[in-house]
């Protein structure tokens, strides 16, 4: 993990591989952002001109490297674009700082230490820059040959140390913001590792073991239901999805409790460690990235551990619904009827609509505790990707105010999300001649159909929201801002924010 320190040192005297400064896009060319005064001065206050000469504009994510001015211990200055300059007297938004810090950290992979001289106006800016840098400095190289040293030589190891200049190590608000950023990003990066881990190494059993070990480390109670316990408990959805796999399914319950809690949240994650589609096999071209189908469970796991590390005054139960969806002689067939944990029967028309089956059991079980709200997170439908693209997740809910609260929390932390409806008329498409409901309905609005299916398994009177993260969970394109290729850790920060809001009494 990348180390983070707050530093009041002068930029010139710092022993580092690079000094990072911010550049905004002004109407008449690049503008040097606050925080870089000492660096600018050392260039005879002509840093903006130098950058313009080098072709820099200050556009978001742009990275320009230039030799440090004489008298600086660090050899390199990295100017990172912050995008449009803020309105008069305004400051850069948290997300602009996060993205710029992330882009700079990525550009500095292979370096040991960088000093970030970005605009630090308040504790929120400290937190945003820290988060961006620590998330941007992520790389997944567990399966690459060669040691960490060799990778450092090749310039591939993530930036090892970040010093935030202008952040005050003795300021309690600054310190708290940095500590929060460290806890959240370490757990988020661990979620990314789980998502990126190939499915021959991460299966329901090994995921459950990782959760149990983390629970021990952080004072979280972990209970694992194995296939025998699932059979005894009547979890027909989870068992039905796992029936075709040589790796048996699991349901993991993580309980974080605080003596001062006034609210109880339940987070439920879809944890399909590999989604082949099952007997309704996905065609080639659609299954190469399906190790990402446990991203919801990874997000729930990370958020519960982060909440525990932050000591939030709220009770949180995390549910990881883990199964591998495979075709085999023992697999569930299209046409089979499953008896779910809730007692409802489901006719499986398409074994590739498996996420809703494991979630249905977990939602019904989570409802028994009567939490104040349930939020489920799932890479549930390709339809949601068609609707919202691959950077925005959809939010559905059985309560308009709660859906808005979740959306607001997502916006606050810089996660792109959008509210989606659950139109009643789509329900009849799931009518089954044989069972209480079918696991598929109308093709149009497939993401909403899936949401309507889940809604039926949420306990009476319980506030619930469903996040369909199929689009943003896994980045198949190039890295941008603080988002790497591969697993992104989407929804972790929204869940942590919801836990904070519940703890402070600001959630419903
Ligand atoms: N895991 C997939 C959804 C998905 C697709 C996630 C692409 C990430 C990227 C899910 O289990 C699935 O296969 N959904 C089907 C449902 C359909 C059969 C009703 C889909 O969306 O096509
Ligand atoms: Mn599927
Ligand atoms: Zn799936």
Image: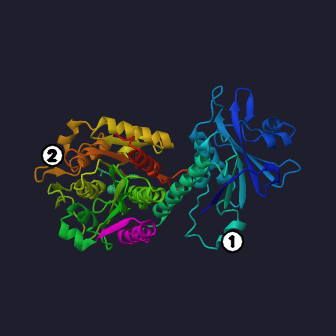
- Identify the residue position indicated by label 1 in the image: 149
Which residue does the image show at 20% across and 70% down from the upper left?
231
* Helix, strand or loop at mark 2: loop
Q: Foreground residue, 481 or 431?
A: 481
Which residue does the image show at 76% across and 53% down from the upper left?
18
* Helix, strand or loop at mark 1: helix
- Identify the residue position indicated by label 2 in the image: 431
Which residue does the image show at 74% across and 30% down from the upper left?
29
Which residue does the image show at 46% across and 69% down from the upper left?
217
Q: Position of residue 406 (x, y in %)?
A: 39, 41
Quarter occupied by the N terminus? bottom right
- Disc 2: CA contacts within 10 A as few (<14), some (14-19) or many (>=20): some
Read off the magenta span.
200-225
Q: Quadrant of ligand 2?
A: bottom left
Q: Position of residue 376 (x, y in %)?
A: 33, 51
Q: Foreground residue, 91 or 423?
A: 91
Is 243 placed left or right of 114 in the picture? Answer: left
Q: Foreground residue, 142 or 291?
A: 142
Is 441 placed left or right of 307 in the picture? Answer: left
Q: Position of residue 4 (x, y in %)?
A: 64, 57
Q: Position of residue 262 (x, y in %)?
A: 34, 49
Q: CA distance from mark 2 to mark 1?
A: 59 Å
Relative to 91, say whether 497 is above or below: below
Asked if the stretch drawn in magenta spans residue 330, the answer is no
Q: Foreground residue, 171 or 1?
A: 171
**Would you say residue 357 is visible in this rendering?**
yes
**Would you say residue 284 is visible in this rendering?**
no
Q: Is mark 2 within 8 Å of ligand 1?
A: no
Is 20 placed left or right of 217 in the picture? Answer: right
């Amino acid at each position: 993990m990348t180390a983070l320190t707050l530093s009041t040192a002068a930029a010139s005297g710092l022993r580092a591989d690079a000094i990072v400064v911010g550049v905004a896009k002004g109407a008449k060319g690049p503008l040097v952002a606050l925080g870089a005064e000492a660096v600018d001065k050392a260039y005879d206050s002509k840093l903006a001109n130098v950058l313009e000469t080098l072709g820099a504009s200050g556009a978001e994510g742009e990275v320009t490297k230039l030799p440090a001015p004489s008298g600086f211990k660090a050899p390199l200055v990295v100017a990172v674009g912050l995008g449009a300059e803020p309105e008069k007297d305004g400051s850069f938004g948290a997300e602009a700082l996060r993205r710029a810090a992330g882009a700079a950290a990525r550009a500095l992979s292979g370096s040991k230490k960088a000093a970030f001289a970005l605009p630090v106006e308040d504790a929120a800016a400290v937190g945003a820059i820290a988060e961006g840098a620590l998330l941007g400095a992520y790389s997944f190289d567990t399966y690459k040959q060669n040691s960490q040293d060799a990778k450092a030589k090749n310039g591939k190891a993530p930036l090892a140390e970040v010093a935030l200049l202008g952040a005050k190590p003795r300021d309690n608000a600054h310190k708290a913001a940095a500590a929060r950023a460290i806890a959240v990003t370490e757990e988020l990066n661990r979620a990314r590792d789980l998502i990126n881990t190939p499915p021959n190494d991460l299966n329901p059993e090994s995921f459950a073991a990782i959760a149990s070990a983390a629970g021990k480390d952080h004072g979280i109670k972990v209970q694992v239901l194995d296939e025998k316990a699932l059979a005894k408990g009547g979890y027909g959805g989870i068992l039905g999805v796992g029936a075709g796999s040589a790796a048996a399914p699991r349901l993991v319950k993580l309980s974080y409790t605080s003596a001062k809690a006034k609210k109880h949240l339940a987070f439920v994650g879809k944890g399909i460690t590999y989604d082949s589609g099952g007997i309704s096999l996905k065609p080639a071209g659609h299954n190469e990235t399906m190790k990402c189908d446990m991203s919801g469970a990874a997000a729930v796991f990370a958020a519960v551990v982060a909440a525990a590390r932050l000591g939030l005054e709220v009770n949180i139960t995390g549910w990881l619904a883990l199964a591998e969806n495979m075709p085999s002689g023992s697999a569930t067939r299209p046409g089979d009827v499953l008896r779910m944990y809730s007692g409802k029967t489901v006719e499986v028309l398409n074994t590739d609509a498996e996420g809703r089956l494991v979630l249905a059991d977990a939602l019904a079980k989570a409802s028994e505790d009567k939490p104040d709200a349930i939020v489920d997170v799932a890479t549930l439908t390709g339809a949601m990707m068609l609707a919202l693209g691959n950077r925005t997740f959809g939010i559905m809910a059985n309560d308009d105010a709660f859906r808005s609260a979740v959306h607001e929390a997502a916006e606050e932390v810089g996660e792109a999300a959008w509210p989606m409806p659950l139109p009643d008329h789509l329900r009849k498409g799931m009518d089954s001649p044989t069972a209480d409901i079918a696991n598929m309905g109308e093709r149009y609005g497939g993401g909403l159909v899936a949401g309507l299916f889940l809604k039926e398994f949420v306990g009476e009177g319980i506030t619930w929201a469903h996040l369909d993260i199929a689009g943003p969970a896994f980045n198949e394109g190039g890295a941008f801002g603080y988002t790497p290729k591969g697993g992104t850790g989407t929804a972790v920060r929204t869940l942590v924010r919801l836990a904070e809001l519940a703890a402070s009494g600001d959630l419903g």
